[in-house]
Amino acid sequence: MKNITLAVEDEILEQVKLTAAEQRTTVNGMVREFFATVAAKRHAKDDARQALLRLAREAAGDMGSKKWNREELYDR
């Protein structure tokens, strides 16, 4: 586990300390949880992106024999 240093305005830190106490945790615990959430969301997005790319590679994509032209599509 790595240690980091954060610069936070005094008033904000006091409010966060109160919130942490209300939630029976620490400021450090709140920061760890926030970082874990950010990392999990990024991981989920990466997984979804990879699944979409895999689906695109594997899809048959048969559109049939019908050919469309602009006039038919817009029925002018």
Image (spheres, rainbow, N blue to C red):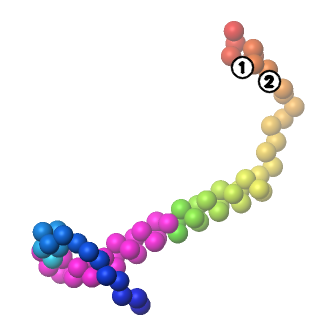
Q: Is residue 8 left or right of residue 33?
A: left
Residue at x-position 84% and y-position 35%: 64
Q: Residues within 10 Å of mark 1 (few under 14, many from 20)?
A: few
Q: Position of residue 2 (x, y in %)?
A: 40, 88
Query: Can the viewer see residue 36 in this picture?
Result: yes
* Callout 2 amino acid: Trp
Q: What is the span of residues highlighted in magenta in the rendered image?
A: 18-42
Relative to 56, residue 40 above or below: below
The kind of secondary structure element at disc 2 is loop
- Please check the rendered image and state whether residue 12 is part of the magenta-colored stretch, yes or no: no
Q: Are marks 1 and 2 in contact (CB under 8 Å)?
A: yes
Would you identify the image quadrant in which residue 7 lies?
A: bottom left
Give the mark nearest the N terminus, 1 or 2.
2
Q: Which mark is on residue 73?
A: 1
* Callout 1 amino acid: Leu
Q: Nearer the viewer, residue 9 or 37?
A: 9
Magenta residues: mostly which secondary structure? helix
Cα distance, mark 1 to mark 2? 7 Å
Would you identify the image quadrant in which residue 13 lies?
A: bottom left
- The tally of labels here is 2
